[in-house]
């Protein structure tokens, strides 16, 4: 039962494409938070930022791990539903945080911050992965077939 819930997927190329694309998009955000790459604050700076803002340390840690390690595991298609579920929660929280800035990204610097359109797109992708699974060329598929 647990094996079916976690690993069942079909050979769908669409699931593969969205899984790989969301991993590629999310990984740089995780690398900023974990490693300080791409102008990020690194692990300690990110933990400090989140916890000073009132986020419990365990939740801050889960965000960092989900966006960094989780995105790499999504790329491989390993435990896809777990990482997609965690990203779904992160995107719901991010949408709430950005809702006051409107829908659109801040393309022209005329808003007080970024809107939530990006988060909504990622949310649609992660919910799709929760439903369909990892798809073609995934570790999940290999595990489930055995």
Image (tube, helix red, strand yellow):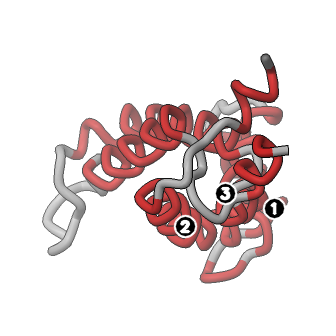
Quadrant in the picture for the N terminus: top right
Residue 85 image position (x, y, % from top left): 60, 34
Location of residue 45 with respect to 143 vertically, above or below: below
Earlier sequence position, callout 1 versus callout 3: 1
Earlier sequence position, callout 1 versus callout 2: 2
Along the line of sight, the residue nearer the viewer: 113 or 136: 136
Location of residue 138 with respect to 140 vertically, above or below: below
Mark number for residue 11? none
Q: Secondary structure at mark 3?
A: helix
Question: Would residue 113 appear left or right of 146 to someone viewing this image?
Answer: left
User: Would you call the spot at circle 1 few (<14 residues within 10 Å), some (14-19), or many (20 or more)?
Assistant: many
Instruction: Choose top left, top right, bottom left or bottom right for residue 2.
Output: top right
Question: Would residue 118 appear left or right of 7 to someone viewing this image?
Answer: left
Along the line of sight, the residue nearer the viewer: 90 or 3: 3
Residue where numbered disc 1 is placed:
43
Q: Secondary structure at mark 1?
A: helix
Residue mark closest to the camera, 1 vs 3: 3
Looking at this view, name the residue that lies furthest to the front.
146
Question: Would residue 58 appear left or right of 75 to someone viewing this image?
Answer: right
Quadrant in the picture for the C terminus: top right
Looking at this view, name the residue that lies furthest to the bottom.
38
Along the line of sight, the residue nearer the viewer: 78 or 104: 78
Q: Residue at x 77, y 45 (%)?
A: 145
Residue 118 image position (x, y, % from top left): 32, 55
| Residues under numbered marks 1 and 3 in contact, where contact means CB atoms less than 8 Å apart | no
- Disc 3/disc 2 C-alpha distance (Å): 7 Å
Residue where numbered disc 3 is placed:
74
Residue 114 image position (x, y, % from top left): 30, 56
Question: Would residue 26 appear left or right of 47 to someone viewing this image?
Answer: left
Q: Secondary structure at mark 2?
A: helix
Residue where numbered disc 2 is placed:
20
Q: Residue at x 18, y 44 (%)?
A: 102
């Amino acid at each position: 039962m647990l094996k079916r819930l976690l690993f069942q997927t079909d050979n769908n190329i669409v699931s593969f494409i969205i899984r790989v694309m969301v991993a590629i998009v999310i990984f740089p955000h995780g690398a900023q938070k974990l490693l300080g790459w791409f102008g990020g604050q690194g692990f300690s700076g990110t933990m400090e930022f989140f916890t000073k803002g009132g986020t419990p340390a365990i939740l801050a840690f889960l965000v960092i791990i989900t966006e960094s390690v989780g995105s790499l595991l999504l790329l491989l298609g390993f435990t896809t539903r777990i990482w997609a579920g965690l990203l779904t929660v992160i995107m719901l929280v991010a949408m709430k945080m950005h809702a006051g800035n409107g829908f659109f990204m801040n393309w022209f610097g005329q808003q007080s911050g970024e809107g939530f359109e990006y988060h909504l797109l990622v949310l649609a992708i992660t919910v799709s992965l929760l439903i369909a699974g990892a798809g073609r060329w995934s570790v999940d598929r290999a595990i489930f077939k055995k």
